[in-house]
Image (tube, rainbow, N blue to C red):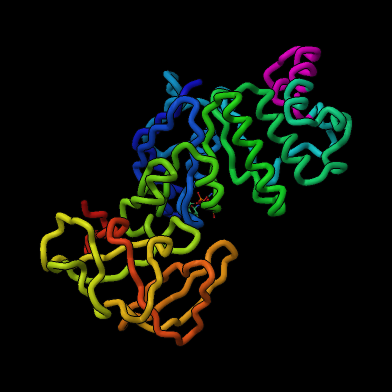
Amino acid sequence: MPGVEIASITKEFAGGVTALDALDLSIEDGEFFALLGPSGCGKTTLLRTIAGLEPATSGSLHIGERDVTGLPPGERNVAMVFQDYALYPHMTVRENIAYPLKIKKVARQQRNEEAEGAGGSLSLDALMDRRPGQLSGGQQQRVALARAIACRPDVFLFDEPLSNLDARLRLEARGFLKQLQHDLATTAVYVTHDQSEALALADRMAVMELGEIRQVGTPAALFHRPANLFVAGFIGSTPMNLITGVVGASGVAFAGGVLPVAETSAPHGADVVYGIRPEYVGLAGPGETLAGSVKVTENLGAQFLVTVELGEAQIRATVPEGEEPQIGDRVGVTPDARRALLYDAAEGTLLA
Ligand code: ATP
């Protein structure tokens, strides 16, 4: 299956909004690629531009070897699955699934066979004669997916397809979506607000801000080595600790003490932001060099976090199992020096 090559795509809307700003992106053949970012960063515009629903102001777009920049949506061989499923209420499930094939002028018998096949692969066999109004949200979502599969597209484009489902169905749907994409080996571009969804589903992902891509990589790379402060602050269910300080002989000095660093090429005296995830900050007795009082406790089920005040700074730490520090307790914190990341304070970029 072909990949998608986006070269210097800009999209300006009337009124001077630059939704995509000379954006470059290579999505590989067969890859499940997630686009993540805050509201208004341009995710949906990028997806719609790939689909051909939004003409690019400049730049070029290839699907495999084909230059599709000027082609209408129907000639790009992509299938889009929307948040609201966009099913036709007056058609049966079978007719809904087969509809894009009808548009492509595929003969009735063949399109019914394709619809049965795609419906079967999503366990819709018993529902083929129902109308969308007679289906649950999860079933409607599967019909929308079956319709996309029946088209045998080169690329699936997903615009938050799970966001109308309740939490349990969403988790279930995540599993089958990933399995389906794996089995079909079709390139997929997946827009979501939900970073846990992106981290769980994607082979690689991009974090966007203001029409630009801030980082592209595997979920693990973005989680463990965010390339800049924007991504560091954005990725992670609990935000990364980010503490401003100055590089010294034994670590990063800040108002509350010295934070340990394993190794850095940052010069002494450099202004940096010290980044460390709460998962890598341990808790110890108040005898540690870094000690302060507990400000906030958060019991998250598998994880118990505390926010400790260190001078003017605060750091979130993970509480060892069995312990239950209380607000106001004096505790020590022990950041794992090997997990600490340093960012240039002015540029916000990761230092080696
Ligand atoms: P969300 O997560 O909220 O859906 P998004 O990242 O998908 O956001 P887009 O919908 O792509 O963001 O919008 C990007 C920018 O372009 C926003 O500033 C938005 O207001 C603007 N925009 C989107 N569509 C139009 C339009 N038709 N006309 C003018 N501006 C638009």
Question: Residue 91 location in percent, x, y?
Answer: 83, 32
Residue found at x 52% / y 67%? 321
Q: Is residue 345 above or below residue 55?
A: below
Q: Main secondary structure of the magenta part?
A: helix
Residue range corresponding to the magenta coloring? 96-115
Residue found at x 30% / y 77%? 288
Pick whichever, 211 or 16, lies toward us. 211
Q: Quadrant of residue 311?
A: bottom left
Tell me if I can see residue 14 in this picture: no
Pick whichever, 41 or 226, lies toward us. 226
Q: Tag count in the figure?
A: 0
Question: Residue 13 location in percent, x, y?
Answer: 46, 48
Tell me if I can see residue 196 in this picture: yes
Residue found at x 48% / y 30%? 31
Pick whichever, 51 or 70, lies toward us. 51
Question: Residue 351 location in percent, x, y?
Answer: 22, 54
Task: Give yes or no for residue 105 being in the magenta stretch.
Answer: yes
Task: Give yes or no for residue 343 being in the magenta stretch.
Answer: no
Q: In screen coordinates, is 41 left or right of 81? A: left
Give the residue at the far bottom of this rendering.
Answer: 328
Q: In screen coordinates, is 27 left or right of 151? A: left
Pick whichever, 18 or 1, lies toward us. 1
Question: Residue 74 location in percent, x, y?
Answer: 60, 25
Q: Is residue 14 above or below residue 295?
A: above
Residue found at x 36% / y 47%? 215
Q: In screen coordinates, is 157 left or right of 238? A: right
Q: Quadrant of residue 200?
A: top right
